[in-house]
Image (cartoon, rainbow, N blue to C red):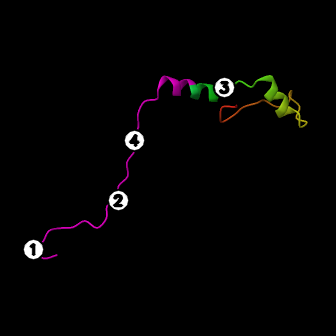
């Protein structure tokens, strides 16, 4: 670039992290996911393949539907 010429930017790289508080509904959903409730019908489906319900504890990383 020569003196007096206008500078140009060919590319730009940056990183950003955005954060905001959870809503009350999001907090409740996270609490339910940490301790999900399995209805009896779901338990029957899960344990019908031969797993012994007395030897296994149900847990989930997502809310069961």
Q: Residue at x 66, y 36 (%)?
A: 61
Label 1 vs label 3: CA separation? Answer: 66 Å
Cα distance, mark 4 to mark 2?
Answer: 16 Å
Q: Which residue is mark 4?
A: 18
Q: Report which quarter residue 57 is drawn in.
A: top right
**Helix, strand or loop status at disc 1:** loop
Magenta residues, as a range? 1-28
Question: 43 left or right of 65?
Answer: right
Question: Disc 3 or 4, which lies upstream in sequence?
Answer: 4
| Predominant secondary structure, magenta span | loop
Identified at 89% across, 37% down, the residue is: 49
Q: Which sits earlier in the primary sequence, circle 4 or circle 1?
A: 1
| Residue 50 covered by magenta stretch | no
- Is the N terminus in the top left, top right, bottom left or bottom right quadrant? bottom left
Residue position marked by numbered label 1 in the rendering:
3
Element type at marker 4?
Answer: loop
Q: CA distance from mark 4 to mark 1?
A: 39 Å
Find numbered disc 2 in the image and state the secondary structure of the residue it sits on: loop
The answer to whether mark 4 and mark 2 are in CB contact below 8 A is no
């Amino acid at each position: 670039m020569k003196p007096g010429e206008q500078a140009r930017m060919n590319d730009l790289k940056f990183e950003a992290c955005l954060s905001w508080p959870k809503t009350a509904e999001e907090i409740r959903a996270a609490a339910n996911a940490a301790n999900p409730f399995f209805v009896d019908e779901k338990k029957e489906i899960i344990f019908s393949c031969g797993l012994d319900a007395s030897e296994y504890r149900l847990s989930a990383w997502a809310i069961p539907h």
